[in-house]
Image: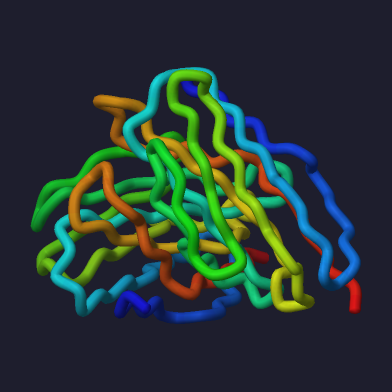
Amino acid sequence: DAGITQSPRHKVTETGTPVTLRCHQTENHRYMYWYRQDPGHGLRLIHYSYGVKDTDKGEVSDGYSVSRSKTEDFLLTLESATSSQTSVYFCAISESKPETQYFGPGTRLLVL
Amino acid sequence: GIQVEQSPPDLILQEGANSTLRCNFSDSVNNLQWFHQNPWGQLINLFYIPSGTKQNGRLSATTVATERYSLLYISSSQTTDSGVYFCAVLKAAGNKLTFGGGTRVLVKP
């Protein structure tokens, strides 16, 4: 299995508070991705990174920012959490864009 | 954007049965993957198969890129095969995987 960890694994927070989720990989893969999974919507891409300090938006990027200062870490920040951001967040990695993506264990976020 | 449709949406199998899951997509792709999400939520990559046929144990997959569909075969199903199976595609020159809605599989003992 690819070495991908996510932290925290579970979080409960209140509306309006900032939240940062961390994805850490030990595979030295170039590409890293953040997805959210919601009933009825499947998995949707939030942001992705194609290298250190190189990031781009996905299809549901509003309300989220990301940073990648090291190859191994990709951070997802909710600047001011809203109830609509309650979801399960998955990080994924791939060696190059068209190749196999490997997923982390997910983070369950509840925004009250 | 590209559309990805999976069928059937739900499948109930008796242990030992065989089944076929289908993924149709609306545009040319250079990446197609099948994933299994187990009941604990973990997403496991099954196949990277933009074209052709691959086999891994009791699972096999075939993608006919020219006709824009892929099939996932489960043979001699086991209860551990339960979960949701997702197909995901990446358009040529695209930058994101688009996931289908999934097929929820329940294998009964």
Question: Residue at left 21%, top 79%?
Answer: A26
In-front residue for pair B11/A105: B11
**Quadrant including the C terminus of chain A:** bottom right
In-front residue for pair A84/A52: A52
Q: Is residue A22 visible?
A: yes
Question: Residue at left 30%, top 61%?
Answer: A93
Relative horizontal placement of residue B27, taking residue B41 as reference (left or right): left
**Quadrant including the N terminus of chain A:** bottom left
Choose top left, top right, bottom left or bottom right for residue A12.
bottom right
Give residue A55's position: percent from left, percent from top.
Answer: 20, 46
Q: How many marks?
A: 0
Scheme by which the image is coloured: rainbow
Question: Residue at left 56%, top 79%?
Answer: A10
B33 is higher (above) or lower (below) than B36:
above
Relative horizontal placement of residue B11, taking residue A19 as reference (left or right): right
A12 is higher (above) or lower (below) than B92:
below
Relative horizontal placement of residue B102, taking residue B11 as reference (left or right): left
B15 is higher (above) or lower (below) than B22:
below
In-front residue for pair A22/B22: B22
Give residue B108's position: percent from left, percent from top.
Answer: 90, 72
Question: Residue at left 22%, top 50%?
Answer: A49
Choose top left, top right, bottom left or bottom right for residue A45.
top left
In-front residue for pair A91/A109: A91
Relative horizontal placement of residue A51, taking residue A94 as reference (left or right): left
Give residue A92's position: percent from left, percent from top.
Answer: 36, 61
Q: Can residue A108 be seen in this view?
A: no
